[in-house]
Image (tube, rainbow, N blue to C red):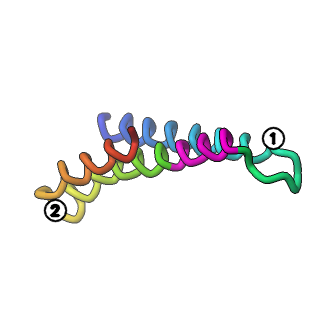
């Protein structure tokens, strides 16, 4: 049950980050460059996406590829990128 809930949580966060980034790009007028504010928000969404994917992958990598020694290192990188 924990694996299912963790997977659904990662999918939800990644999905919201992708949707939010797509909405920001879509709202821009066609042909106009991204404003500095929108560009920063888009970068933030990409970092949230990358950090959450790293955190989600840490458990899978530790379990299925048998690299338990790097679990906390991957988690630390994931949280650093996420925040």
Point out which mark residue 4 bears.
Answer: none
Q: Is residue 59 visible?
A: no
Quadrant in which the N terminus appears: top left
Q: Are marks 2 and 1 in contact (CB under 8 Å)?
A: no
Report x, y in % for residue 67: 16, 62
The stretch of residues the image draws in magenta is 36-46
Residue in front for this viewpoint, 46 or 14: 46
Q: Is residue 1 above or below residue 18?
A: above
Q: Residue at x 24, y 60 (%)?
A: 64
**Secondary element at image label 1:** helix
For disc 1, the neighbor class at 10 Å (few under 14, some 14 to 19, many from 20) is: few
Helix, strand or loop for the magenta stretch, by majority: helix
> Residue, x 72% and y 41% (percent of image)?
24
Q: Position of residue 48 (x, y in %)?
A: 47, 43
> Which type of secondary structure does the marked residue at label 2 adopt?
loop
Q: Is residue 73 left or right of residue 26?
A: left
- Disc 2 packing (10 Å; few <14; some 14–19; many ≥20): few
Taking depth in this image into account, of 72 and 41 the one nearest to the observer is: 41
Is residue 35 highlighted in magenta? no
Is 36 on the left-hand or right-hand side of 14?
right
Please, which residue is most extreme toward the front here?
Answer: 36
Q: Up-down: is 71 above or below 65?
A: above
Which mark is in front, 2 or 1? Answer: 1
| Residue at the image point whose x is 78% and y is 53% from the top | 33
Return the residue at label 2.
Answer: 67
Q: Is residue 14 visible?
A: yes
Identify the residue shown where x is 32% and y is 41%. 3
What residue is shown with label 1? Answer: 27
């Amino acid at each position: 049950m924990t694996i299912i809930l963790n997977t659904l949580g990662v999918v939800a966060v990644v999905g919201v980050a992708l949707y939010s980034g797509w909405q920001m790009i879509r709202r821009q007028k066609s042909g106009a460059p991204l404003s500095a504010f929108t560009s920063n928000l888009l970068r933030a969404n990409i970092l949230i996406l990358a950090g959450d994917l790293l955190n989600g992958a840490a458990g899978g990598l530790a379990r299925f590829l048998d690299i338990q020694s790097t679990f906390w290192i991957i988690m630390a990188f994931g949280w650093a990128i996420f925040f």
